[in-house]
Amino acid sequence: MKSVKFSKEDYPVIMKSLDEQDFETFISFFRNTELLVECEYMQTRSKQKLAPTESAQFQIGRRNVYVQTTEMIKIRIQNEWAGFIKGRIYYSVKDIEERDGDFQKLEECTPKDLFLTDLTQWFLSTSFIQKIKVIPIDQSSEETTELQDDEYYTRAEYNTQLQQFNPPIKEWTTYCYCKKLYDPGERYIQCDSCNEWVHYTCSGKSDKELKNISKLRFICLPCTEANRKKKQSNIQENSTQDGDSTKIRSFNTTYGKKKK
C-alpha cells in the first residue's frame, strides 16, 4: 500500500471527475493507496446492509437506476470516508429502443421487467434508495403475482453491444393459446381437456362465471374447435358408411340371387 502523492496536474482532473460524477476516473487515482478500502458490505443511510451481488435502486437526479452490485469501496477524502458502489446496470423495456422482429414481443412485458446488462457504473453510496429483489419470472409463485414496490421480474440478460438477449426472446415462456409472454399478474384458468392455462380475458367466460371458477367446467377454444371438427368428421364418416351400406343393399336387391 503506497502513500498518496498527487501532482499539480492531478488535482484539476480529480476535481473535474468528481464534479462530473465520473467516478471511474476519480477512483482510479486512489487505487492501491492507503486512502482506498474495499468493503464486504455497505451500511446505508437508511440503515440497510448492502452486500455485493445484491440488487439495489439508486437515484441520479430524477432518474432511477437499478443495478446488481459487484464492488464496494470507501475513499478517505479530507478526513472523511466516502462510500462508492459499483454494479451492473439493469435495463427496463423502455431502455431498449430496438422493436423489429422478435423485439416486438417486448411490448408484452410487464412494467416490472428488468434485464441485467453488460454495462457497469459507479455510484455514491448517498444516492442509494433501497435494496430490490429481482425474481426470475419462471420462478414466480402466488406470493409474487402482486409485487411490492421493491420487487421486480427478470426473463433474460441483455447484451447492449450485440443487442441480444440471453436466452433469446423466442425461448421466453408464453401462456395461453394467444401465445403472449407470461405475466404472473394476469389471471388464468386451466382447460379441463388439454390442461393448458388460458387468460381470463381469452376464456370467453363472463365475470360472473369466473367468480365460481371451482364449479366451472372449462374447455378452451382450440379444444372446442378440435372437438367440433372431430364430431363433424365422425358424422361425415358415418354418413359415408350409411351411404355405402345403402348401395350394397340396393346392389344385392337388383343383382343378387334370391334365396330358394
Image: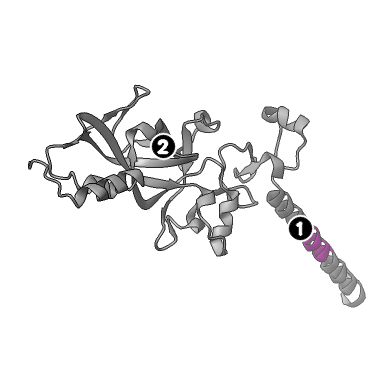
Q: Residue at x 45, y 38 (%)?
A: 139
Badge 1 crowding class, 10 Å Cα cut-off, few under 14, some 14 to 19, many 20 or more, is few
Whole-percent x, y for residue 35 in the image: 16, 37
The disc labelled 2 sits on which kind of residue? Answer: Phe
**Residue 182's spot in the image, x, y percent?**
56, 45
Looking at the rendering, which quadrant does residue 146 occupy?
Answer: top right
Tag 1: amino acid: Asn
Q: Is residue 219 visible?
A: no
* Camera sees residue 125: yes
**Which stretch appears magenta?**
234-242
* Secondary structure beneath label 2: strand
Please name the residue shown 73% across and 53% down the image.
Answer: 225
* Residue identified by numbered label 2: 58
Determine the main secondary structure of the stretch shown in magenta.
helix
Q: Earlier in the sequence, mark 2 or mark 1?
A: 2
Find the distance from the CA under tag 2 to the CA under tag 1. Answer: 65 Å
- Percent across and percent down for residue 239 are 83, 62
Q: Quadrant of the C terminus?
A: bottom right
Q: In this view, does 97 lie to the left or right of 22?
A: right
Q: In this view, does 160 lie above or below 31?
A: below
Pick whichever, 179 or 194, lies toward us: 179
Magenta-colored stretch includes residue 197: no
Residue drawn at point x = 39 percent, y = 35 percent: 56
Image point (65%, 42%), residue name = 199
Question: Is residue 239 within the magenta segment?
Answer: yes
Q: Which of 21 and 197 is in front in this view?
A: 21
- Mark sitting on residue 234: 1
Residue 102 percent coordinates (x, y): 54, 61
Residue 113 placement, left or right of 21: right
Q: Which element type, helix, strand or loop, lies under badge 1? A: helix
Front residue of 161/217: it is: 161
